[in-house]
Amino acid sequence: MKSIFTLLFSISLLLPLPSQAGEILPLAVDLQKTGKVAEKHQVPVVIFVTATWCNYCKKLEENILTPLLETTPIEEYAQFQQMLLDKSHWMMKDFAGNDVEMKTYGPQLGVKVAPTTLFFNSQGEQIAEPIIGLTLEEHYPANLEKRINQALEKLGNPKRLDIYKLVEESDGL
């Protein structure tokens, strides 16, 4: 597991840092539309709930998510979105197509800590346990892999994510 983290961290040092939210990880502006795409491909919707003031969120995005999204085909296993908890008046559509304020939607979903990673089916029902916080970065990729695989199984999708293999194949190691 430590080698996955080391590999991802090494990749992250070579990549430019995102200058604003949504640059690498798309903002959750229309979850109804995202849900339709996820349903078509029989994959979960994964939402990373973050805040601009959160140093752990920045570590998660810069050291793990950005390298994965830029260097691997991980998007074949889920539809990834980001929701910010601290941006007043940023509007989005929930899974039912209702207009909601991004800042208040996270707490409506039960989010109390940033970062929190949530896993949904196309209708907005949680289908895997959330990942709450970021304690040790080297454990996060395995936790993400486990939850995405649980979600894929609940959706009846036989695909299984192996993050280490994706990273290895993408880097040609």
Image: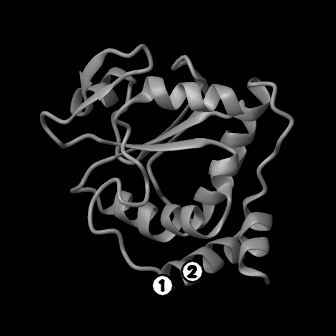
**Residue 10 percent across, percent down from the top left:** 57, 84
Q: Can residue 136 be seen in this view?
A: no
Q: Residues within 10 Å of mark 2 (few under 14, many from 20)?
A: some
Is residue 76 or residue 155 the one in the foreground? 76
**Residue 103 percent across, percent down from the top left:** 22, 33
Q: Mark 1 points at which residue?
A: 13
**Residue 52 percent across, percent down from the top left:** 24, 55
- Report which quarter residue 21 is drawn in: bottom left
Residue name at image x 26 percent, y 19 percent: 99
Is residue 53 or residue 88 the one in the foreground? 88
Marks 1/2 in contact by CB < 8 Å: the verdict is: yes
Q: Residues within 10 Å of mark 1 (few under 14, many from 20)?
A: few
Its colouring scheme is one colour
Q: Is residue 69 above or below residue 151?
A: below
Disc 1 to disc 2, how far (Cα)?
Answer: 5 Å
The quarter in which the C terminus is drawn is bottom right
* Mark number displayed over residue 11: 2
Q: In this view, does 173 lie above or below 48?
A: below
